[in-house]
Image (tube, helix red, strand yellow):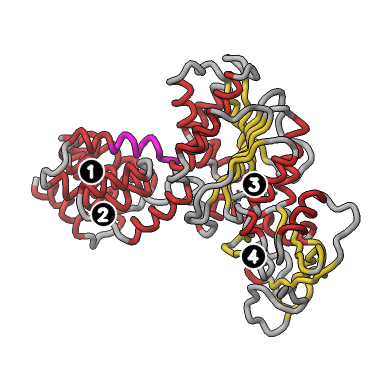
Amino acid sequence: MKVSDTVPVCAPPFAERVVLQQPTSLSTSALWDLNGRYFLARGPAAWEEVPDYVTTSTWNGRIQAELIFGFVQDLVAQGKLGRDGRVTVLELASGTGRTAFHIDRCLQALLAESELEDIDIQLVLTDLVEANLDAARRQPWFVKAAEEGRVRFAAWDLCADEVPVPIDGPVVVLANYCFDGVPTDAYSVEDGLKALAMGISIPADADPQDARLLDQIAVHWDVVDVPDGVSYEPLLRYYEASVEGTFTLPVAGLAFIDRIRALTPASLVVVADKGPRRLDEVARDEPEEISRHGSISMNVNLHSLAWWNEHIGGNSLSCWHPGEGLDTIVMSRGVQPRALNRAFARWADLDAGTYGTIWEMASSNAPSNVGEALTLLRLCGHEPSGLELTVDVLEEGILAGEVDAATILGVLERVEATSYLPEPYDVDFDMGRLAYALEDWELARHYFGRSADALPTSTPSWTNLAAATFQCGDLEAAHSAAIQAVAFDPEDNDALEVYSWFDED
Ligand SMILES: C[S@@+](CC[C@H](N)C(=O)[O-])C[C@H]1O[C@@H](n2cnc3c(N)ncnc32)[C@H](O)[C@@H]1O
């Protein structure tokens, strides 16, 4: 085994370092508090650096909606839930709520088209950070769902003993990129089972209160005896007998599985994260790496979660193919997973991780014709980032008469339905471009108007709003938009061109 007590892991080369934390078990380390502090300080701005595009994709949303629907079908078919019964869907660490939005859209559609339309799905979005939940509360989709009494929001630490809402029936727990940043323990098996203790140092001149302290930490590991009364003893003994090297236990995740078990006889826990899924992937030569992206994350031992769930009498479906940083495990209890298994099987070859890989490929090799562009949009479930990759080709296709208006209007409708505002890029502007190319002037005016509302100093938005409004025949409003466009950038050629239409009049 190559664990050493002096090897700094991911340490920037600072000359002098001081000890922030003497070696202690990984789960009680300051690492996790520092991580929480980072998210509290950054709020939704965290996603400028924390990766989320696979978990928050329409694709992942659809998969998880179908899994929940399968679970509900099984509950009803097996007499565990009435046709007007209630299921609580508790999302842990829901971030901005974008994943929940995609799940809820798909799930509501699935229920509405089935004989289970009266099932009451209660969605509870939780996160450590109130500011993240606020982003979700403002979404038109969730505003309406809250009015209908279907969604609640709770600022809540998932390591707390109490769950944030009363549980009085079947529960679905969703954990997307969540157990990778909360307490985890580390062990090694060489000549028997040992625990790994982690120490942390920081540069001598670093501010220990800095929300970005995680960028500056270095860690080192000690090999220590396993403490008496350690949790998850059967799992540890199983690994002691079957692996060699170092491994982690996601103790916050395992504790959650136990907590749900104590609260309800019927549950579904879906975990989407990166980490070992098979026994032969569990152990490594070196301690697990700590990835840094503003916050920190560690691979989640997905195998251990599935194993523990089976140990306590549940069924675990693990796992799908390796993909772009995301694997999914599906753990049910208290129900025979029949429809759930079928839902799982439908996605066996095209899981969210695979979607991420395809998306990476498409991003580095943008579509070159209308057919490829429309395929890519379909592949990404018409989410706005897909429009960003395809808008140029589609606009050219419209102008060349290679695509009909109904197809483009269908695209716009679908992209609009998947938009979760504010999108990281100006999707309204690109929707306006397509509407303008179709010569649907009112629609173009609508989108460019929204773009100018969202980006009130954007000359291109005002320029295009002026052009679309001009085409609508509302010359006074068009003129004032053109004045705005030129005011924000007096040298912009497009703005000056549109402005000149009015000079000439
Ligand atoms: C990597 S993000 C994942 C967000 C979202 N699930 C996704 O897939 O994009 C981690 C989230 O965990 C939240 N978080 C961190 N520590 C937490 C804790 N102890 N309890 C609840 N949420 C926590 C953060 O605020 C952040 O929203």
Q: Amino acid at mark 1?
A: Leu
Picture layout, residue 105 above or below residue 243: above
Callout 3: helix, strand or loop? loop
Which badge, 3 or 4, comes first in the chain's sequence? 3
Report which residue position mark 2 lands on. Answer: 367
Report which residue position mark 1 lands on. Answer: 434
Tell me if residue 196 can be seen. yes
Tell me the CA gap for discs 1 and 4.
44 Å
| Magenta region includes residue 421 | yes
Nearer the camera: disc 1 or disc 4:
4
Question: Residue 260: where, in percent of width, then height?
Answer: 72, 35
Tell me if residue 95 can be seen. no
Nearer the camera: disc 1 or disc 2:
2
Q: Amino acid at mark 3?
A: Val
Picture layout, residue 165 above or below residue 43: above
Tell me the CA gap for discs 1 and 2.
16 Å
Report which residue position mark 4 lands on. Answer: 290
Q: Residue extending furthest right?
A: 228
Q: Is residue 239 left or right of residue 281?
A: right
Range drawn in magenta: 411-422
Question: Residue 332: where, in percent of width, then height?
Answer: 64, 34
Callout 4: helix, strand or loop? loop
Picture layout, residue 78 above or below residue 270: above
Report which residue position mark 3 lands on. Answer: 129
Picture layout, residue 60 above or below residue 236: above
